[in-house]
Image (cartoon, rainbow, N blue to C red):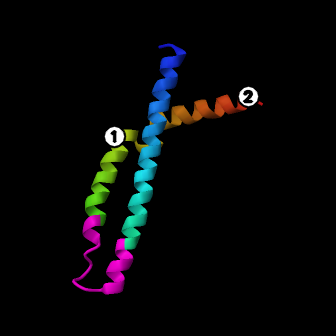
Amino acid sequence: MDDQALYEQARRHVRQIRGFYIHATVYVLVNALLIGLNWATARGGPWAIWPLFGWGIGLAAHGVAVFGFGGLWGTDWEARKIQEIVEKRRSP
């Protein structure tokens, strides 16, 4: 694979990672708001757990799609991180 193809592949993967982080941030913020609203109104029991659970399944699926079953700290992650550190130490 030539350098341009490798660059494009890495660029796509970085965009997928960024998309996951945005998804996770929105998940936390929206669900915090829903939990606060549920707590403030205190009507009908803890209904906020249902969107938290349902959306959590979607977020987990997104994470698996981006990072694979190894997650953030699988063997791929170790190899990538080692390569990243080696490259940083090579350049001043």
Left-right relation of 69 to 4: left
- The residue segment tinted magenta is 34-51
Residue identifier under label 2: 91
Q: Nearer the viewer, residue 80 or 11?
A: 11
Question: Would you call the spot at circle 2 few (<14 residues within 10 Å), some (14-19), or many (20 or more)?
Answer: few
> Which residue: 42% across, 63% down?
28
> Which residue: 34% across, 46% down?
62
Give how far across and how far down residue 15 sits, in percent: 46, 38
Distance, label 2 to label 1, CA atoms, is 33 Å
The secondary element bearing badge 2 is classed as loop
Vertical placement of residue 49 versus 78, above or below: below
Left-right relation of 59 to 17: left
Residue identifier under label 1: 65
Q: Residue furthest left?
A: 44
Give how far across and how far down residue 50 sits, in percent: 24, 68
The kind of residue on which mark 2 rests is Ser
The kind of residue on which mark 1 rests is Ala
Q: Quadrant of the C terminus?
A: top right
Vertical placement of residue 67 versus 3, above or below: below
Residue 42 is inside the magenta segment: yes
> Which residue: 64% across, 34% down?
85
Give how far across and how far down residue 16 sits, in percent: 42, 39
Vertical placement of residue 18 versus 42, above or below: above
The secondary element bearing badge 1 is classed as helix
